[in-house]
Amino acid sequence: MSQPAPLNPLTLPLHGSRLIEASAGTGKTFTIALLYVRLVLGGQHGEDDTAFVRPLTPPEILVVTFTNAATQELRERIRHRLVEAAGVFRAEGTSEGAPGASRSGGHSTGMLNVAPTDGFTAPPRRLAAGEAPVVALDPLLL
């Protein structure tokens, strides 16, 4: 069986959904933060067929991870990368600033959608375990 090709976050296509799965210490957080910044900046130049159709704002991007600790680490890393990218554009003195900056409030990092999977699965699990309040359900909906 052949080994899969190494993931290059600079050339990974940004359209569609992406799943990053790897062992601890392999650079998942680094890769996800870089992909996030690429989505915000747009990455469209020349014949770049890996870019999304337009730059996205932070509320339009959802990153899901498995633990609260990983969620916090990703938020911090993404926030740091966005601030870094904004600094580069300011240092270069580009008159329009970073692509998408006006739409995202200058790359506002207060609206990052990074959530642990528990945020999606906890309510149904609690309901199934009898830990949630009793809810009247129409038997026809079951």
Image (cartoon, helix red, strand yellow):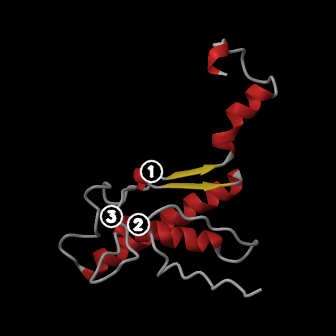
Within the image, what quadrant is residue 43 found in? bottom left
Residue sitting at 49 percent across and 62 percent down?
79
Residue tagged 3: 55
- Which residue is label 2 attached to? 39
Q: Earlier in the sequence, mark 1 or mark 2?
A: 2
Labels 1 & 2 near each other (Cβ < 8 A): no
The answer to whether 54 is drawn above or below residue 91 in the figure is above
Within the image, what quadrant is residue 69 found in? Answer: bottom right
Q: What residue did someone put label 1 on?
A: 110
Q: Can residue 64 be seen in this view?
A: yes
CB-based contact (under 8 Å), mark 3 and mark 1: no
Residue at image location 47% in from the left, 81% down from the top: 11
Asked if disc 3 and disc 2 are in contact, CB closer than 8 Å, the reply is yes
Q: Is residue 95 left or right of 40 when viewed as pictured?
A: left
Q: Which of marks 3 and 1 is in front?
A: 3
Q: In this view, does 51 lie to the left or right of 11?
A: left
Count of marks overlaid on the render: 3
Q: For the residue marked with disc 2, what is the amino acid?
A: Leu
Label 1 residue SS:
loop
Q: Which of 134 and 1 is in front in this view?
A: 1
